[in-house]
């Protein structure tokens, strides 16, 4: 018997005792002001939140953002805010896109994440290939914690096969424990509440 077969035989002979799944009901964290906690959490994750104020419109606020003004090419998955370039039909088409605008279904106050699913962004690679990501979040669509977030997913969000939580731009501190933002994905994340 080879060493490989011996190891696999030992592993398959192990019998582990079944462990019950943890209870999902609990006294999970709640915030007096989930919106304010969301803003803080997004900041802690190196992102930023901008709100559409009274009298302003979403397209006007988005057009006024520096990340939008400086983008040479911008693609939008939102019917509300247009980009200046047609959406590529395949993932590699996003390799030269400066900014992607994507709608989120809701945000999570606990960690500053937003949920985006395949119904909103059918070419998921766009979320990671663009230099900058701008997310549109409907006002009032913020839950306190991830437990509530997963409850929101049950009725069908993500049923298209893909969905993800995004919290801030990409980050790594693998090299000499020096934090680098935007090393392997978008260099910035801006969330616009409207």
Image (cartoon, rainbow, N blue to C red):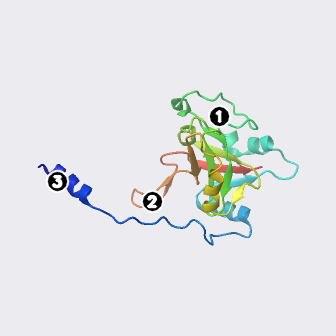
Residue at 60 percent across and 67 percent down: it is: 25
Element marked by disc 3: helix
- Residue 21 is situated, as x and y percent measured from the top left of the image, at 48, 64
Query: Would residue 43 be seen by someone viewing this image from the given angle?
Result: no
- Mark number, residue 75: 1
Residue at 67 percent across and 55 percent down: it is: 107
Tell me which label, 2 or 1, sits earlier in the chain.
Answer: 1
- Residue 13 is situated, as x and y percent measured from the top left of the image, at 24, 58
Q: Are marks 2 and 3 in contact (CB under 8 Å)?
A: no
Residue at 67 percent across and 61 percent down: it is: 38
Does 63 sit left or right of 98 as displayed? Answer: right
Query: Would residue 58 be seen by someone viewing this image from the given angle?
Result: yes
Q: Residues within 10 Å of mark 3 (few under 14, many from 20)?
A: few
Q: Residues within 10 Å of mark 2 (few under 14, many from 20)?
A: few
Q: Residue 44 falls in which quadrant of the image?
A: bottom right
Residue indicated by mark 3: 6
Mark 2–mark 1 Cα distance, whole angstroms, equals 32 Å
Please name which of the two marks, 1 or 3, marks the residue nearer to the observer.
Answer: 3
* Viewer-nearest residue: 27 or 179: 27
- Mark number, residue 156: none
Q: Is residue 51 above or below residue 97?
A: below
Does 155 sit left or right of 169 as displayed? Answer: right
The residue sitting at the right extreme is 55
Element marked by disc 1: strand
Residue indicated by mark 2: 178
Please name which of the two marks, 2 or 3, marks the residue nearer to the observer.
Answer: 3
Q: Residues within 10 Å of mark 1 (few under 14, many from 20)?
A: many
Mark 1–mark 3 Cα distance, whole angstroms, equals 54 Å
- Residue 167 is situated, as x and y percent measured from the top left of the image, at 58, 54
Element marked by disc 2: loop
């Amino acid at each position: 018997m080879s060493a490989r077969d011996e190891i696999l035989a030992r592993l398959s002979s192990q019998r582990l005792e079944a462990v019950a799944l943890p209870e999902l009901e609990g006294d999970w964290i709640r915030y007096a002001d989930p919106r304010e906690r969301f803003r803080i959490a997004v900041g802690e994750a190196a992102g930023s939140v901008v709100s559409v104020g009274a009298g302003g419109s979403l397209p006007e606020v988005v057009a006024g953002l520096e990340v939008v003004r400086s983008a040479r090419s911008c693609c939008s998955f939102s019917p509300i805010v247009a980009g200046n370039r047609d959406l590529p039909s395949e993932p590699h088409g996003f390799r030269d896109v400066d900014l992607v605008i994507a709608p989120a279904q809701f945000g999570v106050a606990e960690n500053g994440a937003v949920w985006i699913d395949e119904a909103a962004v059918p070419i998921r690679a766009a979320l990671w290939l663009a230099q900058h990501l701008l997310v549109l979040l409907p006002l009032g669509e913020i839950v306190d914690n991830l437990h509530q977030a997963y409850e929101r997913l049950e009725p069908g969000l993500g049923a298209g096969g893909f969905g993800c939580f995004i919290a801030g731009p990409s980050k790594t501190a693998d090299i000499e424990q020096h934090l680098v933002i935007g090393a392997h994905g978008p260099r910035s994340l801006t969330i616009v509440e409207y």
